[in-house]
Amino acid sequence: MKVQSPQKPPVSEQTLARLPGYLLILRRLLQEGNREASAAQVARELLVSPVLVRKDLAAVSRVGGKPKTGFDLAQLIGDIEHYLGADTRREVILVGAGSLGCALMSFSGFRDLGFRIVAAFDSDPALTGLTLWDVPILSMEQLPAFCRGLEIRLAILTVPARAAPSAAGLLIASGIRAIWNFAPVHLDKPADVLIKNENLAASLALLAGRLGHHIPAGRPEKEGKA
Amino acid sequence: MKVQSPQKPPVSEQTLARLPGYLLILRRLLQEGNREASAAQVARELLVSPVLVRKDLAAVSRVGGKPKTGFDLAQLIGDIEHYLGADTRREVILVGAGSLGCALMSFSGFRDLGFRIVAAFDSDPALTGLTLWDVPILSMEQLPAFCRGLEIRLAILTVPARAAPSAAGLLIASGIRAIWNFAPVHLDKPADVLIKNENLAASLALLAGRLGHHIPAGRPEKEGKA
DNA sequence: TAGATTGTTAATCGATTAACAATC
DNA sequence: TAGATTGTTAATCGATTAACAATC
């Protein structure tokens, strides 16, 4: 039976974005031998306010923490993992096996959060048939049947900009529900498909812009500590 | 002589983050033969409100647009480029020539925004001395002198998580002012150094989380069009 | 018990949007 | 001129923070 949590209000985009960060810290604390952690402890590491951490955790964890001791680490980690993974298949395909695509295939960080790139697709016949980092590279023609067959819902799009719109169309037509798009182009989509644009060049420009204009980065470091 | 623009209030982080997107669209419009563009035109492509575009542009452009005709494309592109690049050297170094690092070296998108990876550094002696995609790979020992000599201020950090803290320390000691950190660890830093954390696995988890919980992605598509 | 830490309600803060006068 | 589009002032909206009562 499915035990969802429909009574809680949906968490904000910002809260969701902080969850993976919490997960990393909580896991490390657990590995270091702790059984519990306080919101203040987590907040210090992420440089956010403790209240924010408590609010975020309250939004996604069913158990909550205990006064004086804090949160049960194992329990909390499980809750966050469940929340991030709830109702979502963790199998991912990758479209575009160029240098960036191959780098993502080799990237171990996805595995730590439970994701697995199960196949890559490329229009270059020289690449199809190869297996890189345990990921088989298939032809674009094989994509629809593959996605339908395995009910894949997540795709990473690392093709050149000019190829991205048609590739995205093919993905959507093949049942993909969310696309992580690394091409710097706007992709049209139906309302029920999610597209997250990742523009690496823009990210670098943003950093350089902040540097040039001395905009303080987020909250300042806290003075003094325990 | 330096002509800065100290009288304008610093733009918000959000505005800054949208500038590269404007730049891409405006350049494309110019290439397509247009001389001018309206805020509404740009807004439609980025799915943001036209008022927001006007506010953003007013914050970074000195000239402003003209009623009826809109903004002069060449002028506006120049202003945004200048704003993003103001007071900032565009030379970047890359630390950690693993698969992700190499992918970024080969990435052409940086060039389009005026950045150039001038050198990569790696502790693996098998890599040092090589030149990949025109980027020479040097040893970590050469880093401080290189950065000091060329006054490099921007660095991309793509080393494994366990090596990141010490590498960041070396970078900061070598005069680097901003670090784009791909390792999923918190890096300590003095107040005047910027660190932008890029956690690719967390980004994917965020997308999957949104998918699982059906959180609408930003503003909905507008109905109807010109 | 005393004290640390939680969870929640109210206040603050800042970004976005709406409304509208100015102007080419 | 008439009309489209800009720039700005005020209203809205939502996230973060502050304050504080609850509780192990």
Image (cartoon, coloured by chain):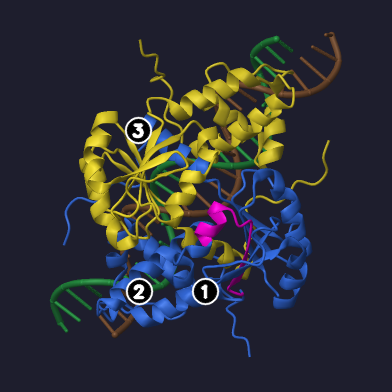
Chain colours: A blue, B yellow, C green, D brown
Which corner quadrant holds the C terminus of chain B?
Answer: top right
Residue occupying image coordinates x 58% and y 73%: A90
What is the three-letter code of the residue carrying label 2?
Arg
Instruction: Identify which residue is drawn at 36% across, 34% down.
Output: A211
Q: CA distance from mark 1 to mark 2?
A: 15 Å
> Disc 1 or 2, which lies upstream in sequence?
2
Tell me, yes or no, if residue B195 can be seen here: yes
Q: Is residue A38 above or below residue B158?
A: below
Q: Is residue B206 magenta?
A: no
User: Which chain is mark 3 on?
Assistant: A
**C-beta proximity under 8 Å, tags 1 and 3:** no
Q: Which mark is residue A37?
A: none
Residues beneath discs 3 and 2 located on the same chain: yes
Question: Seen in the image, is A106 located left or right of residue A71?
Answer: right
Q: In the image, which residues are magenta?
A: A89-104
Q: CA distance from mark 1 to mark 3?
A: 37 Å
> Badge 1: how crowded within 10 Å, few (<14), some, or many (20+)?
many
Check residue A93 for magenta coloring: yes
Identity, as a three-letter code, of the amino acid under mark 1: Tyr
Q: What numbered label is drawn on residue A27?
A: 2
Q: Quadrant of residue A139?
A: bottom right
Q: Which of the labelled discs sits on residue A83, or is there none?
A: 1
Label 3: which residue?
Answer: A214
